[in-house]
Amino acid sequence: MKHIALIGLSGCGKSTLGKMLANELDMPFIDIDITVERTTGMTIQRIFEQHGEMFFRDLEAAAVRSSLALAEPSVIATGGGAVMRPDNVQALRERGFVIFLDRPAELILSNIACDSSRPLLTDEGKLYELERVRRKLYLSTADAVVSNNRDLPHALADLLEMTRALWGKLPDGYAVIGDPIAHTLSPQIHTAVFDSLGIAAKYEALRVPRGMLPDFVSRARKSNLLGFNVTIPHKSDIIPLLDTVAPDAEACGAVNTVLVRNGRLSGFNTDMSGLLDSLREIGYDYNGRRILILGAGGAARGVALKAARSGASSIAILARRVENARVIASCIEGEAPYNVVCGEMTDSVMSIEAACADILINATPLGMRGAGEDFTSLDFLGCLPRGALVCDLVYNPAETALLSRARELGYAAINGLGMLIYQAILADELFLDFLDINIDKGNLYKVIKERLVK
C-alpha cells in the first residue's frame, strides 16, 4: 500500500479530514506544517516573518521527503503550496496516491476568518489568487479529486471510497478511466442521468496510467463494476483486452464504453453518435458538409467514420504524425465515394485545408486543462469560409483559445460538452440495458446541461 497524500488550498480540510481518514483506516497521520513547526521550534507565521516564504518551502520539501520515506503507509496532509515545487510533486506521485481535496475559496472563507496563523490566509483576495494559480497544479498532480463542498461526513465517506479504489478495490457500479482524469465531468453527468431516472447507482473517476490498463481490466473482471467509460489514452489500447467489440467500435478502432457482465467485457463506441447528436442540437449535420478533423487518436477515428457514413462531401484528417491519419483513412475506406485527405498538422497545411472546410473539429487534447499544450498559432482559423462551424471536443475549459478566436472571427463555435452529454446518455442506455427503462435523450440532455452550466 502507498501513502495517501492530501493536497489543496489552505483551509480546504486536509488536516481535519486527514486525521479522520487515518483514524478510519488505522494509519498514522502526518501534517507537514506541524512537522515543520516541530523541527524548527517555530510557528509557520514566525518562519514567514523571519525567514520568508522560500525558506519555509525548503523546510516543507524536506518534511515531504522524510514523511514519504517512512516504510509504514501514512495519511499525509501537505501544505497548500507544496505542489509549487516540482520535486515535491514527483515525490508525492512516486511514493503515494495523491488526492486533491477540492473546496472553493468562498466556502473556505465562509468558515475561516482571516487567520494570522496561516500567512497566506491573512488577505481574502490572496486566497482567490492562490486558487486561480494553483488549481491547475492540483488537478495535474492528483490521482483523484474529492469535493469538500458539503459536510465532513460526506467528504470523509468520499475520501474513504476513493482511497480504497486507489488501493485496488474497484467501486461498485460504474466509472470512467483515463489519464489525466481529474478534469472529467463524467461523474456529474452520469449521476444526473441516474438521478433523473430514479436509479441508485454510483459513478466514479479513476486514474489509470497507460501501463496499468491490463491490470485494471483484469481487476474489473473480478469486481462489482457493471460498466465503465474509457477516455484518453485508452480508447484504442483497450480493444485487444476485451472479449467482444461492437462493429462500429471495431471499424473506427476506438472504444469509449465497456459493459461488464459475468466477468466478460464488451466494448462499444458512443462518441460517434454523441457528437452527431450534439451537432444536430444546434442545427448542423455531416450530410453534404466538408469536414476537417485535427488529430488522429481514438476520438478522431470515431468522428471520421461517422462523418463518412452520414454523407459528408469530403473529409480531411491532419495529425502531427501523418501515418496516424493514414491509418484512420484506411479504416474508413469504402464508407465514402472519395479519398480522405491526410496531412501533417502544421500551420500552413491547416490553413490550406481550413479554406475547404464547413466544419472544423479539434479532436486533439490541445487546449485541454491539465494537458500542458495548446495551439502555437490560430491563424488558420481565418481561412475558414463564411458560415463554418468550429467544434472543439475539449470541454474543460469551456472556452478554449481555439473557440475564443473562432468567435472573434465571427464563426459559430461549440465545445465538447454537448458530445460529452449525448455520448454519456447513449452509454447509460447500454449500462442500463437490463432494466426496462425508456430514456428520453432530448429531455435528459436539457436537464444535464442545465445542471452543468449553473
Image (cartoon, rainbow, N blue to C red):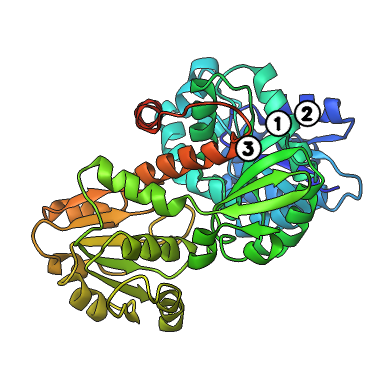
Q: Helix, strand or loop at disc 2? A: helix
Q: Residue at x 78, y 28 (%)?
A: 21
Give the residue type at disc 3: Glu
Whole-percent x and y of residue 3?
80, 45
Q: Residue at x 57, y 65 (%)?
A: 236
Q: CA distance from mark 2 to mark 1?
A: 7 Å
Badge 3: few (under 14), some or many (20 or more) residues near its Cα, within 10 Å? many
Whole-percent x and y of residue 450?
35, 26
Which mark sits nearer the N-terminus, 2 or 1? 2
Q: Which mark is residue 159?
A: 1
Is 46 displayed left or right of 445 in the figure? right
> Which marked residue is nearer to the observer: mark 3 or mark 2?
3
Image quadrant where residue 4 sits: top right
Residue under pointer 3: 204
Q: Which mark is residue 21?
A: 2
Give the residue type at disc 2: Leu
